[in-house]
Image: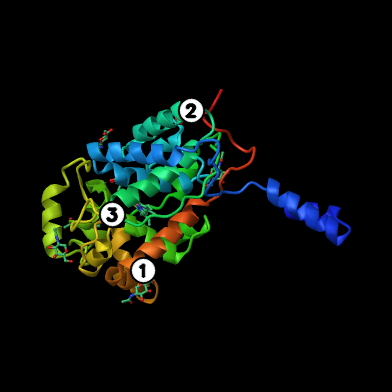
C-alpha cells in the first residue's frame, strides 16, 4: 500500500526511483541488526538470562519456545500473550494452567532495561528467548529478525479460536496454520518442537481407555506406552499430572520426536496422526519419515518455519509500543 501510494506521486522515472528509495527507508520491517546501536548487548543479555533460567530448570526451554508460538498465532508476534488480566490470553483454554515461565521473560526484560531502557520490545525478547532455548537444548540456531513492537491488546477469543488443540484432525490444524500464513511443511516441522517439554494427562488421556467410544485405547499408540500412561493417568485423576512429550530424550532438541511417531510413541493425538492417520498417508507421513532419518533436513525446515512464524503480522514503525513491563500496556 505504501509503495503504490508513493508510486502515484512520481511522474518521471528518476522521481519514482527517489520515492521508492524513500519508501524503502521508511517502510518498517524486521532486521537482524535493529538494536545494533540502541542496545548493542541485547543478544548477550538474553542469552545469559536464558542460560541461567535453563540451569535452574531445563523444562524452561520448552516453556519459552511454546510461549513464542502462542504469542505469534494470536494477533501476530506482539507480546500479547504476556499481558496479565482475567480477559487476557493466559486464560484462554489452550493456555490456562498450561503456559509457564512468564517470569523468566520478566527477568530478561528487567536485565535488558538496566542496560538500554525503553527500546527493546517484549515481543522481540520472547523471540530471542525461543531461539536461544532451541539452541541451548542442542537444536539449530539462526539469526533472529528484530524490530517487533508490543501490542496494546490481548485477545482471549483469538487464542481460543486460533491455537490448535491436540484433538483436532490434520485439516483442522492445517487451517489454523494457513490462517497465519504457514503451510503443511511448517505444521510437520514445527510439531518437532515436541522433542522437548511436557504435557498434562488431560491432553492425551482420551487415547488411553475408550478412544473415540471404541472401548479400547488408541490403536496407534504402542501397547507398552499405553499401559505406562494408563498407570500415570487414571480416569479418576484430575488430569493435571504431566509426562514427557519425547520419551526418548526429553531435554534434547533432536529428531527423536519423528522416530517416536514411526514407533507409535507420539504422546498427543495431534502428534501421532501426522504419521498414522489416513489423511497422513498422502500428505505428512513422508515428511515425518524424512525428518526421522535426516536431522539436517529437520533442522533446516524447522529454522525456516520458525523464521516464518516469527514474521506473523509484526507491529512495526510507530504501531504498538515498547512496553515498560511485559505484563501490562504502558499507561
Ligand atoms: C501442531 C499443533 C500443536 C498442538 C495441537 C500442540 C499442542 C500441545 C499441547 C496440548 C501441549 C501440552 C500442554 C499442556 O499439557 O498443558 C503442548 C506442549 C508443547 N508445545 Fe505444542 N502443539 C502444537 C504445536 C506446537 C508448536 C508449533 C510449537 C513450537 C514451535 C510447540 C511447542 C510446544 C512445547 C515446547 C511444549 C512443551 C511446553 C512445556 O513443557 O512447558 N507446539 N503442545
Ligand atoms: C482477535 O482475534 C480475532 C481472530 O480470531 C480477530 O478477528 C479479532 O479482530 C481480534 N481482536 C482484537 C481486539 O485484536
Ligand atoms: C466407550 O464410550 C462409548 C461412547 O461414549 C460408550 O458407549 C461405551 O460404553 C464406552 N465403553 C466403555 C468400555 O467404557
Ligand atoms: C489443575 O490444577 C489447577 C491449578 O494448577 C486447578 O486450577 C485445576 O482445577 C486443576 N484441574 C482439575 C481438573 O482439577
Ligand atoms: C533412544 O533411541 C536410541 C536409538 O535411536 C536408543 O539407542 C536409546 O536407547 C533410546 N533411549 C531411550 C531413553 O529410550
Ligand atoms: C539430508 O537433508 C539434507 C538437507 O535437506 C540433504 O542435503 C541431504 O542430502 C540429506 N541426506 C540424506 C542422506 O538424504
N-term-proximal mark, 2 vs 1: 1
| Nearest to the observer: residue 284 or residue 133 | 133
Q: Which mark is residue 297?
A: 1
Image spot of residue 208 (x, y percent):
19, 56
Residue in the image at 51% along x and 41% along y: 78
Q: Nearer the viewer, residue 145 or 100?
A: 145
For the residue labelled by badge 2, is the local secondary structure a helix, a strand or a loop? loop
**Quarter of the rendered image showing ligand 3:** bottom left
- Contact between labelled residues 3 and 2, with CB atoms less than 8 Å apart: no
Query: Which residue is depicted at the point 23% across and 36% down?
Result: 56
- The kind of secondary structure element at disc 3 is loop
Residue 253 position in % (x across, y down):
28, 55
Q: Earlier in the sequence, mark 1 or mark 3?
A: 3
Report crowding for label 2: few under 14, some 14 to 19, many 20 or more residues within 10 A (C-alpha): some
Closer to the eye: label 2 or 3: 3
Tag 1, which secondary structure?
helix
Q: Gap between marks 1 and 3, in whole Å?
A: 15 Å
The answer to which image quadrant residue 128 occupies is: top left
- Percent from the top left, x then y, of residue 39? 50, 36
Residue in view at x 32 percent, y 56 percent: 139
Q: Which mark is residue 328?
A: 2
Q: Does 267 appear above or below 62?
A: below
Disc 3 target residue:
138
Looking at marks 2 and 3 on the same chain, the residue that comes earlier in the sequence is marked by: 3
Mark 2–mark 3 Cα distance, whole angstroms, equals 33 Å
Amino acid at each position: 500500500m505504501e509503495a503504490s501510494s508513493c508510486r502515484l506521486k512520481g511522474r518521471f522515472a528518476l522521481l519514482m526511483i527517489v520515492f521508492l528509495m524513500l519508501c524503502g527507508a521508511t517502510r518498517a520491517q524486521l532486521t537482524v541488526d535493529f538494536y545494533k546501536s540502541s542496545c548493542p548487548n541485547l543478544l548477550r543479555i538474553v542469552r545469559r538470562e536464558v542460560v541461567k533460567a535453563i540451569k535452574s530448570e531445563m523444562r524452561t526451554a520448552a516453556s519459552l519456545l511454546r510461549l513464542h508460538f502462542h504469542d505469534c498465532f494470536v494477533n501476530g508476534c506482539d507480546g500479547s500473550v504476556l499481558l496479565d488480566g482475567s480477559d487476557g490470553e493466559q486464560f484462554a483454554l489452550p493456555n490456562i494452567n498450561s503456559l509457564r515461565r512468564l517470569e523468566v521473560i520478566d527477568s530478561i526484560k528487567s536485565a535488558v532495561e538496566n542496560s538500554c531502557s525503553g527500546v527493546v520490545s517484549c515481543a522481540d525478547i520472547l523471540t530471542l528467548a525461543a531461539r536461544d532455548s532451541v539452541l541451548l537444548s542442542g537444536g539449530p540456531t539462526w539469526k533472529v529478525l528484530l524490530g517487533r513492537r508490543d501490542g496494546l491488546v490481548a485477545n482471549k477469543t483469538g487464542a481460543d479460536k486460533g491455537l490448535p488443540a491436540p484433538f483436532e484432525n490434520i485439516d483442522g490444524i492445517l487451517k489454523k496454520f494457513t490462517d497465519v500464513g504457514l503451510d503443511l511443511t511448517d505444521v510437520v516441522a514445527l510439531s518437532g518442537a515436541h522433542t522437548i517439554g511436557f504435557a498434562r494427562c488431560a491432553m492425551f488421556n482420551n487415547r488411553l481407555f475408550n478412544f473415540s467410544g471404541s472401548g479400547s485405547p488408541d490403536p496407534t499408540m504402542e501397547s507398552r506406552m499405553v499401559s505406562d500412561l494408563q498407570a500415570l493417568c487414571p480416569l479418576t485423576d484430575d488430569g493435571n499430572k504431566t509426562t514427557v512429550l519425547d520419551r526418548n530424550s526429553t531435554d534434547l532438541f533432536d529428531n527423536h520426536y519423528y522416530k517416536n511417531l514411526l514407533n507409535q510413541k507420539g504422546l498427543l493425538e495431534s502428534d501421532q496422526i501426522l504419521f498414522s492417520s489416513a489423511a497422513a498417508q498422502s500428505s505428512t507421513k513422508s515428511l515425518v519419515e524424512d525428518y526421522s532419518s535426516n536431522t539436517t533436513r529437520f533442522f533446516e525446515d524447522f529454522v525456516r518455519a520458525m523464521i516464518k512464524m516469527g514474521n506473523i503480522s509484526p507491529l512495526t514503525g510507530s504501531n504498538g509500543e515498547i512496553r515498560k513491563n511485559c505484563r501490562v500496556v504502558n499507561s
